[in-house]
Amino acid sequence: MIETAVRGTRPARALRLVSPSGIDAEHVVRSFRRTLALDDVSLSVRPGEIHALLGPNGAGKTTLVRILSGLIAPTSGTVRVAGLNATANSRDLRSDIGIIPSGDRSFYLRISGLENLVFFARLHGLRKRHAAERAYEVLEHVGLTDAARQRVGEYSHGMQKRLSVARALLTKPRVLLVDEATHDLDPDGSRRVQELVQEIAARGAAVLWATQRLDEIRGFAGAVTLLDRGKVRFQGSVPRLIEHSTPRRFVVRLRNGAGGIELQAAQRALGVRARITPPIEPGSEHHVIALAEGAVLGDAVASLSGIGIDVLACRQERSEIEEAFLALTDKPA
Amino acid sequence: MSVLAVEALKIPAFIRRDFLVAWSYRMSFVTDLVGLAGQALVFYFISQLVDSSKLPTFQGTEVTYLEFATVGLLLGAFIHFGMQNVAQAVRNEQLMGTLESLLVTPTAPYTIQLGSVAFVFLYLPIRIILLVGVLALAFGLNFQAEGVLPALALLITFMPFVWGLGVISAAVIVTFKRGGGLVGMGALALAFVSGLYFPIELLPGWLTSIAEQNPIAVAVEGMRDALLGGAGWSEVGSSILLLAPLSLGLLFAGLLAFELALARERRLGTVGLY
């Protein structure tokens, strides 16, 4: 890191430690009384990058986001956000970050979306007229122009989330922290929020996207940090994460001529290489086959075919990312 | 532009926000005013029972109990309403879930605290003027016109005192979540020995001498001298000089306590919890 003086449009920001990355957290530890919420967590997010912070409930994702935003201090470790020390919780830091919180209750529900945005814009130092203009711009950007004068309390979850994105866009942040933004959204709403965040990243913002929804990081995040019980279990690209996937459970569609599947016969044919479950629903042709350690799917399929059971379709029960996640977090399959 | 100026420019945003929120609950304005009218009526009937000759005189002017109590009622309502709103402002943000959204903006904690109550302190004088107007019209209060401006100056001087008590209460609430009642009890004790609703001379002798040093008593006596006795700037000035440092000191102590409370919450990681 190089220390340098920056002279720009904001004279108060005289001295800034310029960091090559948007977010740099090193050896962060945070404990709450006797609970260790984060244990030696390090991560780095470059400008323009979307970095997924993946983990189950209680993994420490929100704690890390709150530390990065300056809301709470780490017990130890160093945190630099947009080149500034996040633990100092400076005004400059808060000017440079945008936050999309997980909950819906971060707005004033009795006033309109437009008035909410104008209020927050003015807290970011925009003059009244400029704040209103900017609020209209960002509302248009997130597709909420028609609801601008509607009370936020009347917004749907998806609309409130888009309003959160709009708020984060007010100041063109250098760093965007997104905490479980899509956990209660339908697929279309999630996709919309993801597209908006991708646009923000494309403009050069470093984005940290905390989530427990495994399906949404493929093709979206450039890098992943997997947290579990406060510890980093994996760090790298999504393809590297998938390398940890060793799928052992498959949903198969089976048919045995005109008759049903004789489960005991099927299990005898599979032997020790796999275990077959009863149909997912009574009358269904779908079963789950769980392969034993070292067994090969092709062998299992061949042994079923050998007793006259046709395997009409086969797919992994879980995605590769989910398999990797379970493998890395020691969760039972 | 200096940081203070930047922060000051944010206060109107808070006022607009709180006006819009209050306006969305229009009925609460009506119930508040009806409540005030009810209070006035109660004091009118009590005044029928009180012998005016037993009340103290102000600048040699004899007053009715209704006039005496109205000034106390004004200041009491000002203290109660102001302190409660200042203390609850941050608590409400916590409960609504908006406190963290405010804290992640580049806004100083003191601006958040001051901004969150600015609307209340604009609304309070309107409320007081309405109450006095109703009482004067309905029951013929004999207020001295020449004392209005000095009384107003005294009230403005006293405002930071109430604000300070409220901010201390807010700091206690941020720290202990529901501990604001402790400060409220302290304020109630101060109000009890202040002569808001009865002359402090009725208290036991030892308590009277303590009550005379009570800032609320100083304020209410000064206001009665001005409004009921027509005391001018020279008489009220001494009360203002006495109250000004106390008020400012308490406000700064409150803001400092609030900053420290927030810093503690950041350290503990419990900011936003309630």
Image: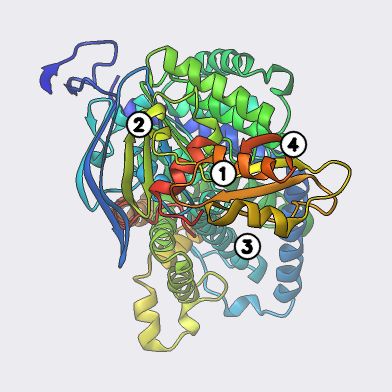
Cα gap from disc 3 to disc 2, whole angstroms: 48 Å
**Residue, disc 3:** B70
Question: Disc 2 residue type?
Answer: Arg
Question: Disc 4 residue type?
Answer: Glu
Cα gap from disc 4 to disc 2, whole angstroms: 29 Å
Output the chain of dot 3: B
Residues beneath discs 4 and 1 located on the same chain: yes
Indicate the position of residue A144 as horizontal and vertical percent values. Answer: 68, 21
Indicate the position of residue B2 as horizontal and vertical percent values. Answer: 28, 24
The tag on residue A103 is 1
Front position among marks 3 and 2: 2
- The residue shown at (28%, 16%) is A10
In this rendering, would B111 be left or right of A182?
A: left
Output the chain of dot 2: A
Cα gap from disc 1 to disc 3, whole angstroms: 47 Å
Whichever of callouts 4 and 2 sits on the residue coming sooner in the sequence is 2
Report whether residue B103 is seen: yes
Query: As rendered, which of B168 and B163 lies closer to the eye?
Result: B168
